[in-house]
Image: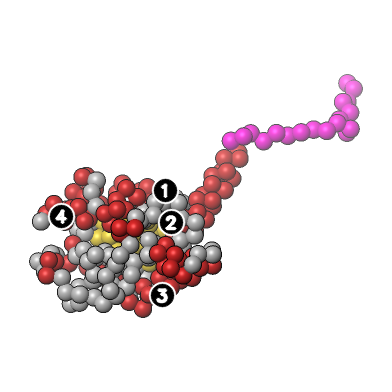
Amino acid sequence: MKKRDVSKRRIRHRKPVWLLLPLLSLIFALIISFWVVNLYRGINPIFPAVSEETTEVFSNDTQDDDAQADVPWYLTLVNRWNPLPKDYDLELMEIEGGELVDKRIYEPLMEMLDNAKAEKLGPIVVSGYRTQEQQQSFMDEKITSYRKQGYSKSKAKELAEQWVAAVGASEHQLGIAVDINGATYDIYLWLQENSYKYGFIFRYPGDKTEITGVAEEVWHYRYVGVEAATEIHNQGVSLEEYLENLN
């Protein structure tokens, strides 16, 4: 039997297209992660800006708020119009990664993160409790970032205030708000669908910017207790709207 001479032939092996899917998925995940990190830093934000009507904030000094005197700690409202109460007290506890949170939210937060880990979402708390000095540092850093992009000092400050709360106006100073990132963008979708089960809410949706005074932050979650979180989730309202309805 005559042997076939294949020495001079070019043999091409075509890989099935499906073998490229893991690589394409990895590239997509890296692109999404890069986008989220830059968004978190306030670089080239694409969400709607806060209107001029919401840019005025109170002074940096904390104030007593009689209207919140009877409100439980987990429903304390802090935003650009409602500063951190002077007498607000908390006991901090360190979580994995080194961030600090109010001891009272430690267990529900850990339960939520553990269940997210079980879904292979790789959740990590990148920001928890902040001191006044830390909050001021975040503001200064954001202003500097906009200045480097060519904005004037006043415009840079205006833009920064849309992404970073003034000292005394940040929920991070309450110790019951956390910024969560993950190994995949799906972490944010999972949190939006499941966080209320653990007492947390997606605090700053894009369609509530005019009410909250903060542009959309897909990573920011705030503890309000399971009952309030469930109602806020089911009704599709902001914390401000929920508290107004209670009153």
Q: Quadrant of residue 204?
A: bottom left
Q: Secondary structure at mark 2?
A: loop
- Tag 1–tag 2 contact (CB < 8 Å): yes
Q: Residue at x 26, y 54 (%)?
A: 211
Q: Residue at x 44, y 64 (%)?
A: 155
- Tag 1–tag 3 contact (CB < 8 Å): no
Q: CA distance from mark 1 to mark 4?
A: 32 Å
- Tag 4–tag 2 contact (CB < 8 Å): no
Q: The N terminus appears in which quarter of the rendering?
A: top right
Q: CA distance from mark 2 to mark 3?
A: 24 Å
Kindly identify the amino acid type of the residue bearing the numbered disc 4.
Glu
Q: Horizontal and vertical percent for residue 138?
A: 41, 71
Q: CA distance from mark 3 to mark 4?
A: 32 Å
Tell me which segment is drawn in magenta. Answer: 1-18
Can the viewer see residue 184? yes
Q: Which residue corresponds to mark 3?
A: 137
